[in-house]
Structures are given as structure tokens and as C-alpha cells.
Image: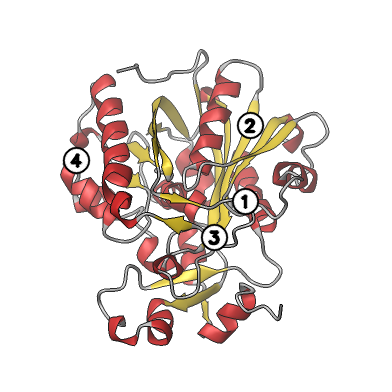
Amino acid sequence: MQSVMKSVLPVGIVGYGAYIPRYRIKATEIANLWRGEQAGNQLPVKQKSVPGPDEDTITMSIEAAQNALKRAEIDPRLIRAVWIGSESHPYAVKPSGTVVAQALGITPATTGGDFEFACKAGTEAIQAAFGIVGSGMAGYALAIGMDTAQGRPGDALEYTAAAGGAAFIIGPAENALAVLEGSFSYVTDTPDFFRRNYQKYPEHGNRFTGDPAYFHHIRSAATTIMEQLHLKPEDFGHVVFHQPNKKFPVKIARELGFSEAQYSTGLLSPEIGNTYAGSSILGLTAILDEAKAGERILLVSFGSGAGSDAFCFKLTERITDVRDKALKTADYVQRSAFVNYSMYARLRAKIRKS
């Protein structure tokens, strides 16, 4: 097994921010339309977030990044890379990263681009940001995971495919609110979920989605990083895993030896659904809003196709100085306006005339 990845220069998170749309649809609203007998406690989440008519991956990325900049307290022009991970980039060719960089005043002396790796596209961008800053090629980098994910009408994914995400500014450890102690990525070719060109909705292989997909990859990444950093579950104050539903992250947390107190703070999926590229990292922002200096956080993402990125962070005293400088994740979770299925279908353009 390869060793964990550590940067040449000490690096960490210097700013973070979340964004979740205001609109919500209850899972029972979807179930009552498509399969009424399943409406009730068997649904994978309580509700999910839905983007408004003027919201997409780019506009939501700008919102989250503005929050991150408020906490980073740096000149945007110091950011030398802007990378956005998503399953729902607005353009097939034009990058989302350049639009976000322009809107935030980061251009022109920067690199920009987009990442794709299903639900771990956001942590893939974060991994690259740690690399470019940790090598000394850039002083700061902005990494974002954001989605307006879609599910086929009546499909199981429609209950959970939600919208939202998070942004992180990566910089030198001396300015960090959370220092990176190490990271590890675990990837295989596992056909559990995919969408071909020109397909509007993704497809999923149900028999692969648990094992050998989600559980195998997260288990492998998490156990490897803990073993090689000589850490145990009790060494962490908080842990957050990818949240495709409310059951999977709880099951893997318990299997690996983590308690409810360790995983509950970052568990957002019952209230907002699966925000795909923003799922695990939105949970991280919720933890950063509450955690104490000196605590360790374990973050393990999962992306279909398939792979996991694991990160170990240790919080610094700076976290208490900056967390109140922008809206917290709980603020976005709590502000909600519910829509019925007809409005939801209109907002997501699920009904077409031709």
C-alpha cells in the first residue's frame, strides 16, 4: 500500500464557506406522486434542497467562495488557482472556474478549470489545491465542490439528488484555521453510477452501490490514513463521510469505531439531501462552524466510478477568530421555503414541450 500524501510545505485551510439554496422539497412529496405506498419512514432523506430559477453551479460557487474569502481575510488577487468540482457544470466546454474567478476579482493572474469525479469532484479539487500550494507553485488556491444534481423523475435518485456545496481557500499552515496532517486517495474502476454524453439523467447499478463501491472505498481510504498517521478513531473530535443518504455514513462510521457524537455534527443529508460534489465537504463546513481548536477532523469523500479521498486536519486557534465572519452552514440549512412537486419540476426543467 502506498503511503499517505504530505506536501513539501506545510499547508491548510485558511478560509471556508458554504451555500445551500433556500428551496426545499419533502421526500414524501416525491413519494406520494410516484409510489405512494413508500411515503413514510422508509425514505432515504427527509427533504432535499432545490436550486432556484436563477441558480446554477457557477452562481452558487460564487456565493460559497465569498464566504470563504471573508474568513480567509486575504486579497483575492493572491489566489493563483480556481478549481471547481461538479457533476452539473452549466457549460459542456466553457469552464465554470474562469467565470467564478472573474466574479471574485481573482483574474487574470491565475489558473482555472473544472474537475469531474462524480461525488468526489470537490475533494479532488481540494487535493489538487493542497498539491499546488504545498509545492510552492502558488501561495493560495480556491477549491469548490458544488452541484445542482438531477435525478430521473420517479427514480430512486430523485429523492436525494440535491443542490449546494462548499468552497475552501488553501494556503500556508501559518495562516490556517485547519492544518492538513496528511491525505490519501483510493481509486478503482467500479461501474456503480455513470452518465454518458447527451444523457440528461445518470444511471446507477444498484448491486454495486454499497459494496464494492461506497463502503469498500471509504473503508480502505479511512483505515489507511489512520494506520499510516498512527491515529485511532478516538483521536478525532469529528468525522464526516460522503452522504448519499442518511444510512450509509452512519453505518460506515460505526463500523470504523466512531461514535454518534463524532459523526452527528457533519451529518446534513437528512435535511438537505445528497449535494453530490458538495456532500462530504458541506458536512466539513458544519463541523468547522462548531469544532474546537486542537481537535482533529477526518474527512472521507466518495465518488462513483469509483474512489475516495481521505484528509486529516487539526484545528488551530484561528478557527474561533474567523468562523463568525460569514454565514454558517446551519444558517443555510434552517432558512427554507418548501415547494410542491409541480413547482419542483418547473424549477428543474423536468417537463419539456419537445
The reply to whether residue 238 is visible in this rendering is: no
Q: Is residue 206 left or right of residue 168?
A: left
Q: Which residue is mark 4?
A: 256
Image location of residue 128, percent across then percent down: 56, 29
How far apart marks 4 and 1 lie (CA) works out to: 37 Å
Q: Secondary structure under badge 1? A: loop
**N-term-proximal mark, 4 vs 1:** 1
Q: Can you identify the residue that label 1 sits on?
A: 197
Q: Quadrant of residue 29?
A: bottom left
| Disc 4 residue crowd, few under 14, some 14–19, many 20+, Cα 10 Å | few
What residue appears at the point 60 percent right and 45 percent down from the top-left corner?
A: 68
Front position among marks 3 and 4: 3
Alpha carbon distance from label 2 to label 3: 25 Å
Q: Report if the CB atoms under discs 4 and 1 are less than 8 Å apart.
A: no
Indicate whether 341 appears above or below 91. below
Write down the residue under mark 3.
149
Q: Residue at x 58, y 79 (%)?
A: 345
Check disc 2 and report the residue beneath it.
141
